[in-house]
Each structure stands twice: as structure tokens, then as C-alpha cells.
Image (cartoon, rainbow, N blue to C red):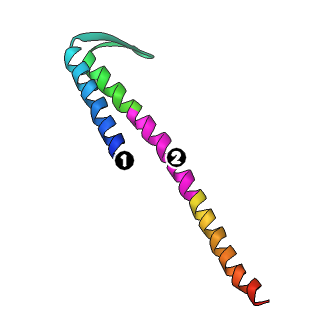
Amino acid sequence: MKGQSYFILGLVFALIIAVLAVINGDPVQFNYIFGSQQWPLILIILVSALLGGLVAFMLNLRKVMQLKSENKQLKQQLSASQQKQPEEEKA
């Protein structure tokens, strides 16, 4: 259920970005460190949204990897604990 809500939220966000991009198709002056250029606002909006999504994905991926590592350690501890338990019951 949680995955579906994220998917729907992503679709709504994509729709909002698409509508804003179509409305704002005029060329604008884009200033960056090494200079400036005229680019369509639609391009700047889409690139900004994609970069934001990429950053969010990378941060989420880092958290997922940490949780997987913690899960693996806990499974190893549980396995070791379960192996010790029958030995203690025999004694």
C-alpha cells in the first residue's frame, strides 16, 4: 500500500511539473558559474526536477543500504543466539 501511495504521489508531481513546463516555455537567461545562456524555462524546470529526483534517490539508496546491512547483522546475531540456546538447554 505504501508503494502505491508513493507511485501516485510521483505521478501527481510529474503532472504538476509537466503543466508548469508547458505554461513556462519562454526562453530565460540562465546564469551559472562560468557564464550565462538563453534556455527555455521548460528545460530548466525539467532538469531541476530530474536532479532533485536523482538526489532524493541517492539519499534513499544510502538509507536502504544501511538498513540492509543492519538487517544482515541482526540475522547473524539471531542465528548465533539460536545455535547457543540448544547447547545451553542440554547442559
For residue 89: magenta?
no
What is the quadrant of the C terminus in the image? Answer: bottom right
Q: What span is colored magenta in the figure?
A: 53-69
What percent of the width, then of the height, locates residue 4?
32, 45
* Residue situated in front as seen by the camera: 13 or 44: 13
Query: Taking 18 as reference, is 1 above or below it?
Result: below
Badge number at residue 62: 2
Q: Earlier in the sequence, mark 2 or mark 1?
A: 1
Label at residue 43: none
Q: How many angstroms separate mark 2 from mark 1 (CA)?
A: 18 Å
| Residue type beneath disc 2 | Arg
Q: Is residue 65 left or right of residue 19?
A: right
Residue at 57% in and 51% down:
66
For the point 27% across and 35% down, the residue is 11
At a point 27% along the width and 25% down the height, the residue shown is 16
Name which residue lies at 30% across and 38% down. Answer: 8
Residue 3 circle label: 1
Q: Which quadrant would residue 81 be assigned to in this image?
A: bottom right
